[in-house]
Image (cartoon, rainbow, N blue to C red):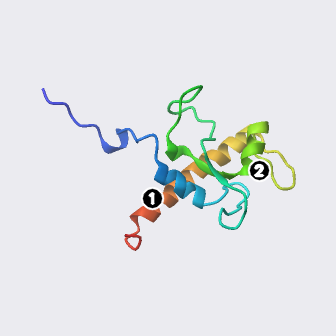
Amino acid sequence: MAKTPKPFHELPLKRQQEFYKAWVRERGCRWCGSARRVAAVPIHASHHHESTEGPHGLGLKTSDYRTIGLCEPCHYLFHITGRLITRAGLILTADETRNFLQRAVIDNLVEFLETILNPEVF
């Protein structure tokens, strides 16, 4: 008996996408807005989203499609506190941080799809 192919939305995405991570880095820092081209600070394509979806944990890596760009200072502060900090020094709650990071992942994917689906790009 032949297998029924899975619907498109159920197909697994390739986990490592260097092209996508490079595109994320070029977008600049999603939190403070610093741009890679303007700032002397590198932008990291970071897997910070407090996800419960997909593989995560020691030795496991989630999909590169769930990355956001964070500049080095924002990336460092996030690692220390587990939260995002405003320029005024206000610390977001865990829920506010999680909501921002999840929204940033979605915004990245939408912008990326709009970019690659734009006929003027090709």
Residue 82 makes an appearance in the image:
no
Residue at x 49% of width, y 53% of height: 20
In the image, 80: left or right of 42? right
Mark 2 vs 1, N-terminal side = 2
Graded by Cα atoms within 10 Å as few (under 14), some (14 to 19) or many (20 or more), the crowding at tag 1 reads few
Of 73 and 95, nearer the camera is 73
Give the number of the disc on residue 59.
none
Residue under the point 56% across and 27% down: 59
Badge nearest the viewer, 2 or 1: 2
Q: Secondary structure at mark 2?
A: helix
Residue at disc 1, secondary structure: helix
Q: Nearer the viewer, residue 75 or 100?
A: 75
Residue at 82 percent across and 45 percent down: it is: 91
- Callout 1 amino acid: Leu
89 horizontally vs 74: left or right: right
Left or right: residue 55 versus residue 116 is right
x and y percentages locating residue 93 in the rendered image: 77, 40
In the figure, is residue 33 to the left or right of 111? right
Q: Is residue 61 above or below residue 99?
A: above
| Residue that mark 2 sits on | 73
Residue 10, how many percent across, how many down? Answer: 36, 38
Residue 57 at x, y percent in the picture: 59, 27
In the picture, which quadrant includes the C terminus?
Answer: bottom left
Name the one closer to the observer, 81 or 90: 81
Residue 39: give x, y in percent of width and height: 72, 63
Q: Residue at point 46% right, 42% down?
A: 16
Question: From the viewer's perspective, is residue 84 above or below residue 113?
Answer: above
Q: How many marks?
A: 2
Give the residue type at disc 2: Pro
* Residue receiving disc 1: 113
